[in-house]
Each structure stands twice: as C-alpha cells, then as structure tokens.
Image (cartoon, grey):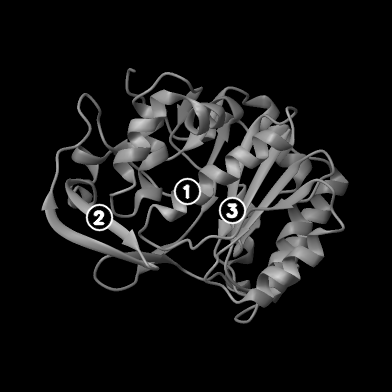
Amino acid sequence: MIAYLLLVHRFPDQFERLFKAIHHPAHHYVVHVDANADASVAAQIETFLSAYPNAAMLERRPALWGGYSLVDAELRGMAKLLEMGVDWEFFINLSGQDFPLKSQSFIRAFLARHRGKEFIRAVNQAIVRSDTMNRVRHYVVERRNRVVRTPFPRPFLRGATPYIGNQWMIVSRRFCEFVCHDPQADRFKAFYRNSFIADEGFFQTVMMNTATHGEVVGDDLRRIDWVPDGAIKLRPRTYTMADAEPLTAGKDLFARKFDAEVDADVLTHLENHIRAEAHDGPALASISTLPPTERQAA
C-alpha cells in the first residue's frame, strides 16, 4: 500500500533503526544516499538492504540544499517506486534523521481511511510567504556541487500561481505518475530547475496548478520544530527524551529530526511505543483533526 523514499547523507546505523521501524513486507522502499556522503555510508546501507527484497538503492547523485538536485532525487525515487510495483497507493518521503511516531499498522489504517487525499503543506507563495518570492523571481544555477544565486530577474510561469510549503509529503500514486511522466509537468520542471530551494515549492506548485491529484489537505503529518539557523533559513530542532511524551501523544505520523549521537534514548522510546501500538492494534484517527483544505482551481 505504501511506497517510501528515504534520503540519506550520514548516520547509517541510525538509518537502519529507521528502516526497521517502517518496514513491512507489503511496502516498497527506495533509498538515495547523497553522492557527497562518504562512500562507507552507501556501502553499509547497500549491504543492509540486501536482506530486503522490497528495497532498492537509487543511483547516487549530489543532493544540495537549495538546489534542484533535491527535487531530482525525489522524482527519480518516485519513478523507481512506480517501476517496482503497481500495488502501492501512497508515497511517503523521509530523511535519514526522521522517525515514525506510529506503527505501520496505524499508518496503513489511517491512509486506508483517507484514500484520495494528498497530505502536503501548500500556501499561495505570493500572498502568504511573499518574503520568499525572490526564490522564483531570480535565475539560479546549480553546478559543481554548489548553488549560485544570480541577480538576473525572470517572470514566473505564465498562467500559474507559485505555491510553497516544505519538502515533506504523503501523496497519491496518481500524483506521482503525473509529476514524473505527464508532459504537462515538464514546464514546471524546466522552470524550477533554476529556482532557489525548489524542493519547498515545486511539488506544491505542480499540484495546485493542475487537476491530476486528490483532495489537498494542508498538513504533511510531520512534527517539526523549526529554529533559526543563520540569516536565510531555519533548521529542525533535534528531539531528545524531554520530547518523548508530546511526540507520541499527537496526531502526527512522523517527526524530524533525531540524532542518536545526541540522544539515542528517544529513539529507543519510540521503538518501544511502536511495538506496543502494533501489538495492541491501531486506534483509527479522524481526518477532522486536520486543518482545512487549501485548493486552487485548476
């Protein structure tokens, strides 16, 4: 039912804990290890995955923060998962420092109740996040493992509205097929290839300006606490055992980020919580707890 894409650049031991926590023999898994990561990371993960016939490694390419290469990794991962099987309905992307807050039985039951919905944050960028419009209004080039922001202006796509959210999503197979293979998506790919932090706007803009998707729910079902990190961006706060109770008490399905070198006990707590929940059986959540849908007519 579920296809997972995992984006990894370090901490292979922590990745293994994440993979075991989300593994189910009926699901499909693709892992991309950043080409800028140490080769030993990819080697360890490849060896680990060899025991799982429903998992595959994606060709390693650089995945730079701020660059279209992150979108490229997502698209290649989606395409690989589409090739791996016709039996999945939902695509979920995770980083190697994410972790589930619910068992796979809970997540599967929740998604089964909400077929036809797209869980992704998407707001009108020009209205709600006007401070970020420079990301799409100026030409950006990604080359030789760095992102170059130029002062050269350019107009946005004719007849389209820019949307923004973040990189994380739970979306339908139907949308994955569209964004990967439909020619209607090509002009968005061409434009966002030369935009800044494209992974926070590309998928939202494609979805909200086209009709091939389900009902859009303004929630990605992730718990992330954003804190300042320099002048131009935020970073997710690292969770510890002090966060254990609120992490498991909420409605979110996943959280980020975690660092076993900072606090491994919180991961152990979540593993125990997931095992107990799987044993006791999932309590089905209600979609009424989620924010209202934001849509744009196609």
Q: Helix or strand or loop: what does disc 3 sit on?
A: strand
The CA distance from mark 1 to mark 2 is: 15 Å
Residue 154 quadrant: top left
Residue 72 visible, this orientation: yes
Residue 113 horizontal side relative to residue 128, left or right: right
Name the spot of residue 264 as percent of width and height, x first.
Answer: 68, 76
Instruction: Point out which mark residue 203 bears.
Output: none
Q: Residue at x 75, y 48 (%)?
A: 103
Residue 231 horizontal side relative to residue 107, left or right: left
Give the crowd class for mark 3: few <14, some 14-19, many >=20 residues within 10 Å. many
Residue at the front extreme, as displayed: 144
Identify the residue under disc 2: 140
Name the spot of residue 7 as percent of width and height, x first.
Answer: 58, 58
Give the crowd class for mark 1: few <14, some 14-19, many >=20 residues within 10 Å. some
Of marks 1 and 3, the one in the foreground: 1
Up the image or down, 118 lies above or below 93; here it is above
Residue 89 horizontal side relative to residue 151, left or right: right
Which residue occupies the foreground of this view, 108 or 252?
108
Name the spot of residue 81 as percent of width and height, x first.
Answer: 66, 39
Identify the residue under disc 1: 72
Residue 284 visible, this orientation: no
Q: Helix or strand or loop: what does disc 1 sit on?
A: helix
Identify the residue under disc 3: 94
| First of labels 1, 3 by sequence position | 1
**Marks 3 and 2: CB-CB under 8 Å?**
no
Q: Residue at x 76, y 62 (%)?
A: 271
Name the spot of residue 112 as percent of width and height, x first.
Answer: 70, 27
